Amino acid sequence: MKRRDFLTTAATGGGAAAAAASLAATAALAPLAAPAVAKDRVEWKMVTPWPRNSPGVGINAQRFADMVTAMSDGRLTITLYSAGELVPPFEVLDAVQSDLAQVGHAASYYWQGKAPALNLFTSMPFGLMAWELDAWLACGDGQALWEETYAPFGVLPFYAGNSGVQAGGWFNKEINTVEDIKGLKMRIAGLGAEVMRRLGAATVLTPPGEIMPALMSGAVDAAEWVSPWLDIAFGLQKAARYYYMPAFHEPGPSLEILVNKARYEILTDDLKAIVRAAAQAVAGRTLADFTYNNTMVFAEMAEKYPSIEIRTFSDDVIRALGAMTRTVLEDMAARDPMTAKVYASMRAFTERCVRYQDHADLPALRQRKLALGL
Amino acid sequence: MKRRDFLTTAATGGGAAAAAASLAATAALAPLAAPAVAKDRVEWKMVTPWPRNSPGVGINAQRFADMVTAMSDGRLTITLYSAGELVPPFEVLDAVQSDLAQVGHAASYYWQGKAPALNLFTSMPFGLMAWELDAWLACGDGQALWEETYAPFGVLPFYAGNSGVQAGGWFNKEINTVEDIKGLKMRIAGLGAEVMRRLGAATVLTPPGEIMPALMSGAVDAAEWVSPWLDIAFGLQKAARYYYMPAFHEPGPSLEILVNKARYEILTDDLKAIVRAAAQAVAGRTLADFTYNNTMVFAEMAEKYPSIEIRTFSDDVIRALGAMTRTVLEDMAARDPMTAKVYASMRAFTERCVRYQDHADLPALRQRKLALGL
C-alpha cells in the first residue's frame, strides 16, 4: 500500500521528481549522440513479462524484434529476453526506464501501481473493442494521452495489438443474480477485480501457471485468464464446469511496446520509422493470431470437451456490473487528474462507438447469423 | 461478355497463356538483377484508382509510399500517381502487371472480370468482418489462395486494410419485404449487385461523383457508397430519405497493395521486409481511420441532418438476401475452380466465426450498450 501510494504520487502530484530522474537518464545517454549512432550498428535489449515463445504475446514480441532487425539489415538489432531472463516479469517498465533494456513488450495495466491511468490504456470494462481502441489511439486523443502518462518515466508507448474480447472466465458456481457474486472466490485481473470486489467477491491474482490447480482444489470458485485459445491450452476446462463468455472487464485489451525515449530520439529518421512501422505491423498480426486461434479452438471445443457449459451473464448481472464499473472509474478519476483526463476522453468516444455500432457491427453480426441459418 | 469470358478463361482454364506472359515480363526485368539493385537507389511508381488525397483510401496509399521511402532512407522511393495521373483508374492491375508501375493500391473486386475469385478477397456478402478477414489471410489459407489467384498476373498481393462494415445505402423507397426489391433502380457494387439483380432490382454502377445527382434526379431509387464518413462527405443525405444500415454485401471490404512480383523478388531482403511491414502498418491505420471517422460523423448525423431516417433490413429481407447470396456464390464456384477453392475456405472459416462471435463480439457489443444504459 505504501509503495503504491508513493509511486502514484511520483507519477502525478509529485511528477517533478520523476521528470528530473528522467532528464538525468537522458543526460547519461549523451555519449551516444546522433552522428555516432548513424554510422554504427545499434544493439537494443528487449524485455517482456512473457515466457519465451508464448502464443499470442511472446511470439509477437519476437516478431517485432525480428522485423526491426530485418528491415534495418541489422543496423538496429533487437535481442529478446523473455520473462526472468534479464529482469523479473513485472520489472519491464523499470528496465526500459533505467535503460537496462531499451525496449519492452508488455501491457500497460501491469504498471497501474505507478500511474493508475495506465489501466485504461489496456482496457476499460464495458469500453472500447480492439479496433475502436486502435482508432482512439491513432486518430483521437489516445496516443497523446498515453505519451503524456508515460512521459514521467522517459518511455514512449506504441500500440502493439490486442487479444480481442476476452472470456468472462471459468466458474464452478453459477452466477444467476448479482447476489451470487457475494462471497465468490475469484482469480481476476485489472479493473474487473475491483468491480467484483465491491460487489462482494474475494479476488486474487493467481499467477497463470497456478490457475488450473487453484480451480481444481477449490482454492478459487472461478478464474478468468484470456479466451478459448489460451484457456484451453492451460487446461482450465478440466477444472471448471461453466464457461462464462464474454468478459465484461476486457472488451479489447491492448498490448504495448515501450521504448526508452532518449534511445529512440537519437536514432536516425529511417530507424525511427522502422521501429514505428514494426509496432503497427505486429499490432495487426497479434489481433489476427487471437481472432484466428480463438475461432478455431472454439469451433472444436463443444465436440472435444462436451462437459463445458457455456453461459453468459444475465442482463440484470450486466446492469449491476455496469453501474459498479462506473462508480469504480469515477472514484479513480476523482483521485488522479491524469486518470480523469484519460477517462473523460475514452468514455466520450466509447459512448459514440455504442451509438455507431448499434447500426454497424452489432446488426451486421446478428444479420450474418440469420442469413447463414446458423 | 466476350471480354469477361476471355479473361476468366485466361486466368483459370487457360492459365498457361497468362503464365507465359508473366514469365516474359519477368525476363524483361533481367537487366535489374539483384546485385545492381542492392547498391543503387530503386524508384517505384505507384498507381491507384483513387483521387489524390481522398479520405481513407488515397491518403493511406500515400502513407504507404511515404513509409517505405522513410524506412529505406530513400533507397526505395515510391512516387504515387493518383486516378488518371499515369493510367485510368481501372487499369491499376494492368499497369502493375506490365511494369508500367511497380506497385498499386486498390481493391481486388475491381479485377473480377479477369479472375472472379478476386471478388471474395474484397468481401463476401454476409462473410468475414474486417478483423476476421485479416485473420483468415494472415493465419488461415487466405494469403496463399490470394497469391495463387494473382500468380497468372505476375503480381503479389498484400492486405492493405479495411473500411469495416459499410452502410446498406440511401433509399427513396422503403424496403419492407423482399417484394419491394423488384423493380428497384439501385446503384450498388460487387457481388451485392448480382444478389439484388436476381431479386428483381435493376442495378447500375454509377461513378462516385455522379451518385448524388442520380439519386436527386430519380435516375436511381437507391444507392450504396461507403459508410457515414464518406457518404456524408459526398452529400448523399441531401438526395435520399432512408439510410439503411448496415450493408449485407460488404461486412468488411479489404484494400490491397499489389506489387510486381519480379520487381519484388529482386529487392534486397531488408527492402522486402520494409515493403511487407509498411503494408501491414498501413492496414491497421486504414481500419482505424474508418472506425474513428464513421463513429464521429455518425454521432453528429442525427443532430445535423434530422431528416435522415435510419432503417435496418427486416429479418425476412435478410433471410431472402442470405439465400440468394448462397445461390450466387455457388453458381460462381461451379463455373470457376479457383473461386470454388476460395469460397470453400472462406465459407468454412465464416461459419466458425459465426459460432465464436455468438459468444464473443456479438454479446460484448450488446452487453456494453446495456451496461452503459445507452
Image (spheres, coloured by chain):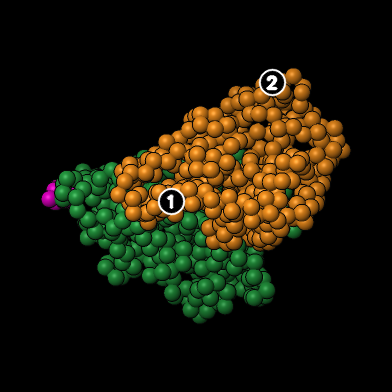
Chain colours: A green, B orange
Which percent across, then down, holds residue B120? 66, 50
Give the residue drawn at x 69%, y 38%.
B189
Residue wearing tag 1:
B30
Mark 1 or mark 2: which is in front? Answer: 1
Q: Which mark is residue A187?
A: none
Which residue is outermost to the bottom? A217
Give whichever of B165, A269 is nearer the camera. A269
Magenta segment boundaries in residue numbering? A25-31
Chain letter behind tag 2: B
Looking at the rendered structure, the kind of residue marked 1 is: Ala
Instruction: Name the secondary structure under disc 1.
Output: helix
Residue wearing tag 2:
B213
The quarter of the rendered structure image containing the N terminus of chain A is bottom left
Residue B79 belongs to magenta span: no
Say few, some or many: other residues with alpha carbon within 10 Å of mark 1 (under 14 / 14 to 19 / 20 or more).
few
Give whichever of B351, A19 is nearer the camera. B351
